[in-house]
Amino acid sequence: MKTRPLFAIFMATLLILPITGQARGGKNSTRTITLIELNDLHAHLVPHMDVVSNGSGGTKVARRGGLTRIATAVKQIRADNPNSLLMNVGDTYHGGAEAFYTVGNAIARPLNTLGVDVGVPGNWDFYYSPPMFRARFGQVDTNQFTDIFTVSVPGFASDVEIVRPNFINLGANMKDILDFFFPQDFLPATYMTTVDGINVGFIGLTSDIVADMHPMLAEGFEFSQGITEHKDLVNKHASDLRNQGADIVVVMSELGIHKTKQLADVVNSGVDVFFAAHTHEVTYNPIQSASGALVVEAGNDGYLGRMDVTMNVNTKRGKTTVSLGSLDWSIIVLDDSVAEDPEMKTLVDAERARFFADNVALIAPPPFFIQTLNMPLDTVIGHTDTLMDRKHSLESSFNNGWTDMVRDITGTEVAMTPGFRMGASVASYMDEVDTVATGDITMEDAFRFFPMLYAVATGQVTGARLKEVIEEQLTRTYSSDAFNHIGGWNYGFSGLDMTLDLAAGDGQRIKTLSYSGTTAPVGDADQISITGCQRLPIEFAGTLCAYEGFTNVEPYTGIFLPVGEELTALDLFVAALGSHTFDGSRHNITDLNNTPMWPASDSIQPLDGVGSAQPAQDGDTCGFFGLCGSGGSGGGSVFGFGF
């Protein structure tokens, strides 16, 4: 028998060993960590009614979300995989009466028990003023954490207490004037932590539209603008994190999923996942970008996003290398099958108790003290026999019903209101668990629809200027260049019939515009009486709903208040419901393109826009004490709403 040479046996062994995963002492294994996305809480402490897709192209009324259910779902995920990180992305401390009357403190206290690891502020978190934003989000020494800061608001004698988040918040695309005087950035660009031996690097992008809400909200701040600046930022910080040893790099983006998707397409391949917020889109299936990164968004507080990240770990000759294996994304629906967490509910009930007391008498803190609350939040103030919500981007039932009411009260030819993503839902039919929804409107609903301070005002506008405002709103919602988007929900109008072609492109979408109930077209030279809104406590002259170019603008008081006193939109809404049944069922907008809209399509705001686009311009961000002039940057949207 012929003996095989030792060299041949050795070589055969080398060929066999890799198949078994062992090579010269090497070892392959996998580890799974879980990234949890909570986005756009909007101060929802308890479950609330919402309008959701029924899965068949229609909608249903459902009870969703709330911090009490979020706590249950987070605990369940952590029990399933202790190697988890919780992100809080986007608008958190604003929305509803509890937030408004405590400048977000009633939200911060229970949220701080949830165990959030890292976050990003949203555009609404800037609402309470730059001093309050700085007090809440300035960097903290975690070894000497101070949960309450007292801040002085310029022009007011009394100080305001601000409860701070007990987790780090990021903002790579924002600079504060104080950054020139202190060694640490006000909002750090990145954060890295280790879970089960896996180094996770986070990049945070806050809102880029704060100056458009109102230039005063951006005082002392500078924000990156446009896709090029954001691309360069992400590329730089992703490279830095990789050089620092990050095994996986994720971006938390408050830019909204439309801008985030466009950004993900053009960055280098250093980012693995973009977690979007701001636009409240529910992505059941991850979006694959051109760079290879996945893009996801977990709706709002009615959902949680779960990303199970499987990493390949190879140890060879004492050196360990880690590479990405797989990304498994799922949406957790926080419906009635998810119980409220008892511990969180105790905390939440304590924060809400004074808003339901018999002797409610609350005055908002400065600078919002004009708004008062003198009845419990569960007080019924009106009724609707139709759906009242803000879920549709082109024409929402709330915008229709509200503008009809104010136009009827003020007697003007036209009324307009900003669009926003937030809001309650009220209906008078059966919800998904066969509970009767009565259609009663409560004070809590009212504060969900008006969680900010603004007044109702009347004025005049030419037909030509009105068309420009409508076209700009359509561009800001439907442009196929996402970085043209400022809002995301179209303004609402009463007194107008519109025929649009959304596919016609930016600045060309209006095909006909006429006065409702007639065939008379709106002429460019027409002088039109109009009801709109004014930002409080300050507004630029000749401005309605953040747009300049109006004349004879005056706050509306009517029969409700003595001359000279300021009437807020919430005040008028409550008063009007005393004589009006809310009806938002009309439809006055026709789209010749028949653009697929939610719920028939997956996205509330079409993901890639509609029609041709004018390239977005990188404008003045109004930061470092540079007011943008009348109406904010580029005409602006509005202080406290529009997004």
Image: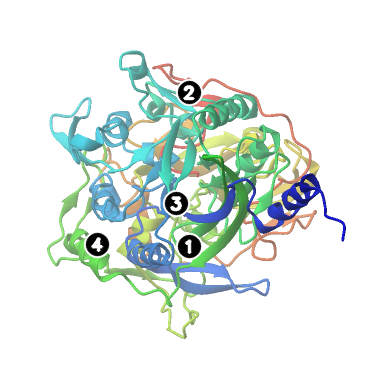
Contact between marks 1 and 4 (CB within 8 A): the answer is no
11 shown above or below 187: below
Disc 4: which residue: 348
Task: Please identify, in this view, whether the residue under mark 2 or under mark 4 is nearer the observer.
Answer: 4
Residue 145, image x, y percentages: 20, 38
On the rendered structure, is 2 left or right of 255? right
> For numbered disc 1, what is the local secondary structure?
strand
517 on left or right of 409: right
Residue position marked by numbered label 2 in the rendering: 630
Mark earlier in primary sequence (1, 2):
1
Picture mark count: 4
Mark 3 neighbour class, 10 Å CA radius: few under 14, some 14 to 19, many 20 or more: many
Cα distance, mark 1 to mark 4?
19 Å
Gap between marks 3 and 1, in whole Å? 10 Å
Mark 3 → mark 4, Cα distance in angstroms = 18 Å
Residue corresponding to mark 3: 40
Position in image of residue 639 (x %, y %): 42, 37
Of callouts 3 and 4, the N-terminal one? 3
Q: Which numbered disc, 2 or 3, marks the residue that appears first in the sequence?
A: 3
Instruction: Give the residue pinned by disc 1.
Output: 303
Query: What residue is shown at x 12% (from left), y 63% (from top)?
Result: 359
Identify which residue, 245 or 137, lies in the foreground. 245
Going by the numbered disc 1, the residue's amino acid type is: Tyr
Classify mark 3: helix, strand or loop: loop
Earlier sequence position, callout 1 versus callout 4: 1
